[in-house]
Image (cartoon, rainbow, N blue to C red):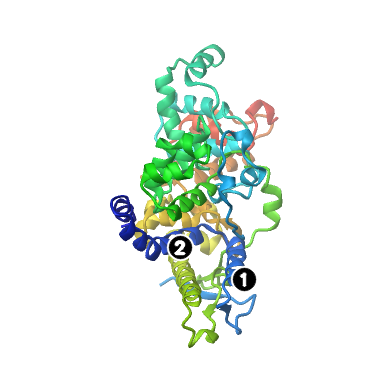
Amino acid sequence: MSQGNIQIQEQAQTQGQVQVQQMLPQQVMLVRLMEMPVETLQHRVELECLENPWLERKEEEGPDSDSGEWQMTDGGSEKEADDASFDYRSEEDMPDFLTGPSHSNNAAEFMAYDDTLSLTDRLREQMADFELSDHEKELMEYLIGSLDEDGLLKKPLAILADEAEIYQGLNTTPGELEQVLRVLWQFDPPGIGARSLQECLLIQVRRDEDNPYRDLLVKLLEGCYDDFIHKRWQRIQQRLHISHAQAEALGHEILRLNPRPGGSVGARTADRAQTIQPDFLVDTDENGTITVTLSRGNQPSLIISPDVDGQQDTFVRQYVERGQMFINALQQRSDTMMHTMQAIVGYQKPFFQTGDETLLRPMRLEDIASATGFDISTVSRAANSKYVETSFGTYPLKWFFTHKATQNKEGDDVTARQVMAALRSLIEQEDKSQPLSDERLTQLLQADGFNIARRTVAKYREQMGIPIARMRK
C-alpha cells in the first residue's frame, strides 16, 4: 500500500500528502519501535512522554513488574536534525554525531553470537548461511580480508583480482569478484562491502523492505545524489515531485543509515556485555512447563490524559492523535514480539527444557515467519538486538537461528553446534601423547554418523580456538 501511496503522490501531490499523514507515519513508527531493544525503547517512551503533554504513564505501573506471560507445557532517545546535518560530501566531511557507534539503528541490528568476535570472524560465520562453491568461499574470504576498518571495499575489483592471483594464488576476474561481492552485501551489518558512500547507503535502503519511503530513497540516492550531498533540497523536491515535508522525511530517513557499517563492531562489545537488559524471560520448571514473559520495559502502560476531555483546540487534537498512534504502535510491537518468541520457544523446546545447545534444531527466519504468519522482515526486526534470559543464561535471539550443517546417518538435519560439540568431545578424550589429526577426527565423526568433510572439521576446530594436533601434545 505504501508504494501505491508514493506513486499517487508523484501524480497528485495534494491527495497523496493526506494519505501519507494518515497512513505512513503509523507504519514508520511501528517499524522504528520494532527495531529497538528494551533499553532503547525505554528512552524512546520517556522522550515521547516529555514531548507530548497529553501522554501519561498509568499510575499503577511498577518499574519492575512483568506482564505478557505465556506458557508451554509438555502436553534512546531520538532527536531530529536540521538540514545542515545532511551534508555527506565525503566520509571525512561527515560530522562526528553521524559516525559514532550509536548513530545507526541498522548497525545495532547486527548481533553476533559471541560479542568478543571481530568483524572478520562475524562475517566468516555468516558464510555458512549461503550456498557457495569452494572457489567462491575462497574469494569471499579474500574480499572479507580486503575490507577497511569501516567495513568498506576501497580497492577497485580489477586491482583486487590481480592481487589475488599474485599474493594468494587465486585465479579470478573482476566479474567473478563482483558476483561474490553481491552475496557479501546480504551479510550483516547492512552496507558491509560497499565500494563508496553512495553504494553503502543504497545497500541499506534496498534491504529495508518495510520502509514506506524505500522507493523514493532509492530514486534520491541514484538520481539526485549530487544534489543531495550539496543539500540542494529544493531541486530534489522538483525532480522527485515531492513536497517539502516529504523531502524532510527523506532526509531524516537517511540520517538513520550507517555510513561506516564495520567501524563500531567489536569496539563496544565489552561494555555492552555489562549492560544487557533481556527483552524476554523464559523459565522452565521441574515439570518441563515453559513460561515466556515479555519484560515490563517492552510493555510500557501509557494513556491519554483525562484532562484532554472537552478540549477542542486543533493543536491539542494533534497531540492526542499522535499519542494514541504511539500507544497503538507499542501494543502492536508487544504482540508481535510475544508471538515471535513463542514460535522460537516452540521450535527449540528441547533446548529451553534442558539447556543443551546440541539439541537446537536448524531454524531459519522463514520457519518462524511461517509459524507466526509474519513477514520475514518483521521476524528479523523482532529478533535483532533482542535478548532472552533463561534458566541457563542470557542469549541474543539470533543465537537460536541455526542452519543445517550436514545430516546424520538417520537422515536428520544436524547443526554446526552439534558437530562442534561432538568434535570437542573427541578432542577432550584423545590421548594427549598422540593427539588426533583432522583426518582421524573426520573418520571418527563419520563413524558416529556425521556426514562431514575434513576441511569442515578443520574450520570448526579453528572456530573453537583448538590448535592442530601437533600443537596439542
Tell me the residue at 54%/11% (across/down): 166
Examine the rendered structure and indicate whether residue 365 appears above or below residue 280: above
Check disc 2 and report the residue beneath it.
30
Examine the rendered structure and indicate whether residue 173 appears above or below residue 14: above
Residue 141: x and y, percent? Answer: 52, 28
Residue 363: x and y, percent? Answer: 42, 51
Q: Quadrant of residue 38?
A: bottom right
Residue 121: x and y, percent? Answer: 58, 36
Examine the rendered structure and indicate whether residue 83 appears above or below residue 17: above
Q: Which amino acid does label 1 sit on?
A: Leu
Q: Earlier in the sequence, mark 1 or mark 2?
A: 2
Q: Residue 16 carries which label?
A: none
Residue 406: x and y, percent? Answer: 42, 40
Tell me the residue at 43%/56% (across/down): 379
Viewer-nearest residue: 129 or 424: 129
Q: Which amino acid does label 2 sit on?
A: Leu
User: Which is in the foreground here, disc 1 or disc 2?
Assistant: 1
Viewer-nearest residue: 318 or 132: 318
Viewer-nearest residue: 373 or 425: 373
The residue furthest top is 166
Q: What element carries label 1?
A: helix
Q: Quadrant of the C terminus?
A: top right
- Number of marks present in the image shown: 2
Report whether 133 appears left or right of 265: left
Q: What element carries label 2?
A: helix
Check disc 1 and report the residue beneath it.
50
Report whether 195 appears left or right of 14: right
Q: Quadrant of residue 44?
A: bottom right
Whether residue 404 is visible, yes or no, is no
